Image (cartoon, helix red, strand yellow):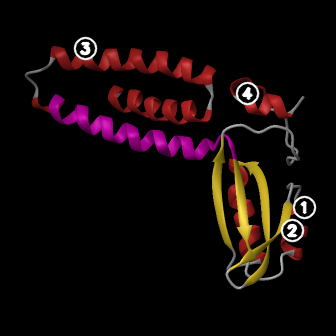
Amino acid sequence: MSRILDQGIGIMRLIFAAKGYRKIVFVMACFESLVWLLAVSQIMKHLDNVLCYIAFPVGFAAGNYIGIMIEEKISMGMVVIRIIPKKNTDALIERLREKGYGVTAVNAEGISGPVKMVFTTIRRKESKEVIEIINNFNPNAFYTIEEIRTVSEGYFRQKEKNMIFNFFNPARRRTEK
């Protein structure tokens, strides 16, 4: 069990480190190493038990899986969605703006002629809602979603202030000045 916990924390720590959440990574690293030390000390005391040789790697694998699942559920961070629709984008753009999303549209040239490329930068938690809107207004649109490490300025959908999130997210603090 402790191996699942330490590895789950480790996976989340790596994901948060890649996104630049230094403070939470520091806390997680301290806790992860403490749990790992406790797990290894128990293994060393019971090297004659075959179950330890099974439990340690299974705990490692399960911790990876659980850590990724938890990180997906909390969905911290920002993403940019780039949309290249197959048909007129006016209704899609209007709906995204009605919902409070900042939208930038650019004229572009596609394989079959002129298109309008649409960009929106959103909180990762909002991705499902935006994808639903895209599929409702332009079901065959080509779109990509990319993680963003830092955001400065811009127009973002309003939501309640979250002190813990702001403490751990330096990019968010910069955009709310």
Q: Is residue 140 above or below residue 96?
A: below
Q: Is residue 14 left or right of residue 175?
A: left
* Residue position marked by numbered label 1 in the rendering: 97
Label 2 sits on a secondary structure element that is: helix
The answer to which of marks 3 and 4 sits earlier in the sequence is 3
User: In terms of secondary structure, what is the magenta stretch mainly?
Assistant: helix
Label 3 or label 4, whichever lies nearer to me, is: 4
* Residue position marked by numbered label 3 in the rendering: 41
Residue 70: horizontal and vertical position, in percent?
Answer: 53, 41
Is mark 3 in CB contact (under 8 Å) with mark 4? no
The answer to which of marks 1 and 4 sits earlier in the sequence is 1
* Residue position marked by numbered label 2 in the rendering: 93
Q: Disc 1 marks which amino acid? A: Arg
Residue 84 vs residue 2, the one in the foreground: 84
Density class for disc 1 (Cα within 10 Å; few <14, some 14-19, many ≥20) is some
**Label 3 to label 2, Cα distance in Å?**
58 Å
Residue 83: horizontal and vertical position, in percent?
Answer: 73, 67
Q: Disc 4 marks which amino acid? A: Pro
Is mark 1 in CB contact (under 8 Å) with mark 4? no
Residue 89: horizontal and vertical position, in percent?
Answer: 84, 75
Q: Is residue 55 above or below residue 120?
A: above
Residue 18 vs residue 163, the one in the foreground: 18
Label 3 sits on a secondary structure element that is: helix
**Label 1 to label 4, Cα distance in Å?**
26 Å
Quarter assignment of residue 145: bottom right
The answer to which of marks 2 and 4 sits earlier in the sequence is 2
Whether residue 4 appears in magenta in the rendering, the answer is: no
Bounds of the magenta span?
52-78
Q: Is residue 147 left or right of residue 97?
A: left
Density class for disc 3 (Cα within 10 Å; few <14, some 14-19, many ≥20) is few
